[in-house]
Image: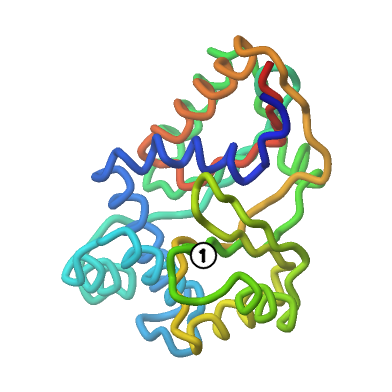
Amino acid sequence: MAGHSKWHNIQARKSKVDAKRSKIFTKLIKEISVAAKMGGSSIEGNSKLKDAIEKAQHNNVPRETIERAIKKGAGELTGDNYETLIYEGYGPFGVAVIVKTLTDNKNRTAGNIRHIFSKFSGNLGSSGCVSYMFKEIGEIVVDRSQDISEDEIMEIAFNYGADDFQTHEKENVYVIKSNADNFKKIKDELDSENIDFLEAEIRLQADTNVLLTSDEDIEKIEKFIDMLEDDEDVQEVYCNAEYEFE
């Protein structure tokens, strides 16, 4: 089967990670704490905190857990001191990889990430070695089962600056892509129209992709990405692999 979309590839990986509920909770809680530490405990004027809270709510993180994470980040409660570290390098088959982490122990995280790259014959590089291949985009995933037509959602998307609108019938979703600047405009308008979305995030997208066609190669890169995502300090993994199934 050919022509699997980039979004489908990413979702296939994410679904595996989403099944591990406790790890997802941990990652979301870290994200909330760091956002509160960086910009304060109020969502007014702290868009990163607002987005982190919304993501946690979409994943059914309890309200008390969210509030505790905010207080820890703001220094109102004692907690771990996390910092953001980004690793770049090449995985199997020359696939460019960016790994975003939140950690309270740099040495542990660096050692774990380096070990995973080495295990799959990859190489960690210096800062900037692959990031130039990626750009920030906004991506919103909307449930198609809502009582609103495709044309109406598409009109909102393009009126507020979307670059791309896709319908994924198998997953029963619409996927809206935009530049990072227009992402918030589209998201706010969907909110004002009471249109629910499954995901809404700024992420990285590669300008060019490495095409993998053999089942064996695809399985290897999936195992590599899964092992990275399973690490307790890893928040996001981006790569430029694209699949075309035989």
The kind of secondary structure element at disc 1 is strand
Q: Which residue is mark 1?
A: 142
Residue situated in front as seen by the camera: 67 or 212: 212
Which quadrant does the N terminus fall into? top right
Picture layout, residue 57 above or below residue 47: above
Counting from the top left corner in percent of width and height, residue 152 is at 62, 79
Residue situated in front as seen by the camera: 34 or 227: 227
Picture layout, residue 70 above or below residue 3: below
Is 48 positioned to the left or the right of 133 in the image?
Answer: left
Which quadrant does the C terminus fall into? top right
Is 155 positioned to the left or the right of 62 in the image?
Answer: right
Counting from the top left corner in percent of width and height, residue 235 is at 46, 47
Q: Residue at x 25, y 74 (%)?
A: 71
Counting from the top left corner in percent of width and height, residue 128 is at 76, 44
Instruction: Examine the image and state in which quarter residue 105 appears.
Output: top left
Indicate the amino acid at tag 1: Val
Q: Residue at x 39, y 32 (%)?
A: 230
Q: Residue at x 67, y 57 (%)?
A: 166
Residue situated in front as seen by the camera: 57 or 45: 57
Q: Tag count in the figure?
A: 1
